[in-house]
Structures are given as C-alpha cells and as structure tokens.
Image (tube, rainbow, N blue to C red):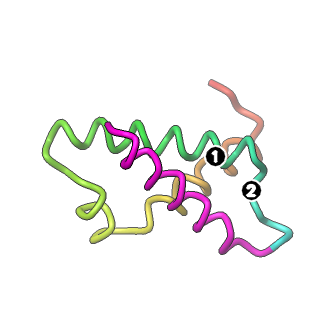
Amino acid sequence: MNQEQLDAIAQRIASAAAQFAPAYRPSAAQIADAAAVLHQMLEGAGTYGVTFADLDNVADFPRMALQLVQSRDERGEWA
C-alpha cells in the first residue's frame, strides 16, 4: 500500500469521524485504531482484487470501522 492510499484511509476516517454527533465523536485513539482496522481490511481484500471503490459500492466502511472500535471500547474487551 502506497502513501497516497494511506492518506486516503486517514482522510476517509477523519471525514467519517466528523459525521458523529459531538457526544458520540470517536477519540483520537479510536480514530487511529479504526484507520488501522480499515488498512488491514483493504490489505486483505486487495489479495482478492477488491479495492476501496468496491467497498464503497457496498457500505460506508470507514464509518463501520469507527463503530467497530467504539463497540469494542464500550464492551471493554481487548482480545
């Protein structure tokens, strides 16, 4: 994954984070974790020729990555 792709992930995560209501806005650590989750998803999916555009056709994966990390933190599980 090149720097341009990493920058796109960071921009997408930041944009998704800004859409949350202030009371539910993710922390900086959650944003970083969500970016890492999305990066790994794209790396794995890329093995099968899946791109960010393909993911965009299905769902808002940056927002889902943030929600996933927030859910993890609410449960207090770090498995």
Name the amino acid, label 1: Val
Q: Are marks 2 and 1 in contact (CB under 8 Å)?
A: yes
Rendered image: mark on residue 26: 2
Which residue range is magenta in the image?
Answer: 1-21
Q: Residue furthest right?
A: 23
Q: Residue at x 79, y 65 (%)?
A: 24
- Can you tell which quarter of the image residue 78 is in? top right
Left/right placement of residue 56 relative to residue 26 reads: left
Q: Residue at x 37, y 42 (%)?
A: 41
Inspect the magenta stretch and tell me whether residue 6 lies in it. Answer: yes
Circle 2 packing at 10 Å, graded few (<14), some (14-19), many (20+), is: many
Q: What's the CA distance linking mark 2 and mark 1? A: 9 Å
Is label 2 in a helix, a strand or a loop?
loop
Rendered image: mark on residue 57: none
Is label 1 in a helix, a strand or a loop?
helix
Q: Nearer the viewer, residue 25 or 68?
A: 25
> First in sequence: mark 2 or mark 1?
2
Name the amino acid, label 2: Pro
